[in-house]
Amino acid sequence: MKRYISVFIMDISSSSSKDNWNRITDYLQEWEHVIDGWCSNIMTAKVSHRRGDEILFVGEHCFSAYTIAHYMSLFWKFAEQRPYFGLSHGAVSEDIDRLDIEIWNHPLIKQARSQNEKIKRDRDRKITMRFADESDLHNLISNADVLNLLIENQLVLQQGQSENQRLVYALYSIFNEQKIIARLLNKTPSTISSHFTRGRSELLQKNFFQIQKLLGLEEGAGVQDFNRILLLIHDLNDAIRGQLKKSMSSLLFFNKE
C-alpha cells in the first residue's frame, strides 16, 4: 500500500566557524526530542540527529517535514548559525514504523540530500529551504517551482523584519492573538499591532498556510481527501503550538545567541 511521506535533511550554516560544536551537538539532541513530542500524538515520524550537525526527519504526509522545518527556523537559538533544509515528499510502499532511517536509502532521501547540497553550495544562501523537483521535464512549471518561489519570498520578508518584528511574528505563530502577545511582552496592543503590520506578519502567515495547502494537494486527490488533509495540517500546527506554549519560560526566541 502506498503511503505519502515527506523528508528533510537539515544542516547548519557556519557550524564550525565558532568554538561551540559541543553546544550545537547538545542543542540538536534537544531538538530531536522536541520534534518527537510535536509529532507523537498526530502522525508517525522518525527523527535522527547525526553526523554532529545534521538532523534527518521522515514523517507521514507531504506537509509534515516542511511544517517542522518552519517552526524550527522560527525558534532557532543560534542567530549566526542558522539551519537550512533540503526537502522531498512522495509516495512510498514502506511502513515508517518499521523503518531504520539510518540505513534507509530511498530516492526521497537522496532527493532531500541533493537539495541540501544545493543550498550549501550557494554562497549567497538566498534560501534556507529547497524542495526537490522530480516532475516531468516537459512541464513548463512544476509544483516544486511554486513552492520554492514561495519559500524564497518568505525568506525575503523575514530578512526585512527588525528584531522586534521577528519576535512578534514568532509569538503570533503560537498565540494568533496580538493582545496576548502585548501582555507577554509588557507592551501596548498598539505597539504590537505596529510591529505586526510593518513586519508583514499577516502575509507571512498566509504564505506559510499556502505552502502547507499546496503540499496537502499532493496527496488529497478529491475534495473529501483534501478536507481530511486540512484537518491533519490543523492538528499538527495545533500540537506544535500547544507544546510551545508549555515551554514559554525557555522559548528559544527569548534566549538568542
Image (cartoon, rainbow, N blue to C red):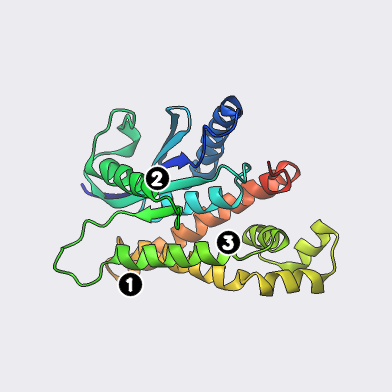
Q: Which residue is mark 2?
A: 120
Q: Amino acid at mark 3?
A: Gln
Place residue 237 in its image quadrant: bottom right
Q: Residue furthest front?
A: 123
Distance from the alpha carbon under mark 3 to that under mark 1: 36 Å
Percent position of residue 15, x then y: 52, 35
Please provide percent x and percent y for residue 112. Answer: 32, 46
Q: Is residue 7 visible?
A: no
Counting other residues with Cα less than 10 Å from the Cα at mark 3, is it few (<14), some (14-19), or many (20 or more)?
few
Location of residue 5 with respect to 19 vertically, above or below:
below
Whether residues under marks 3 and 1 lie with C-beta atoms below 8 angstroms apart, the answer is: no
* Residue drawn at (56%, 38%) of the image: 34
Whether residue 249 sits left or right of residue 136 in the image: it is: right
- Disc nearer the start of the sequence (3/2): 2
Residue located beneath label 1 in the image = 223
Mark 3, residue position: 159
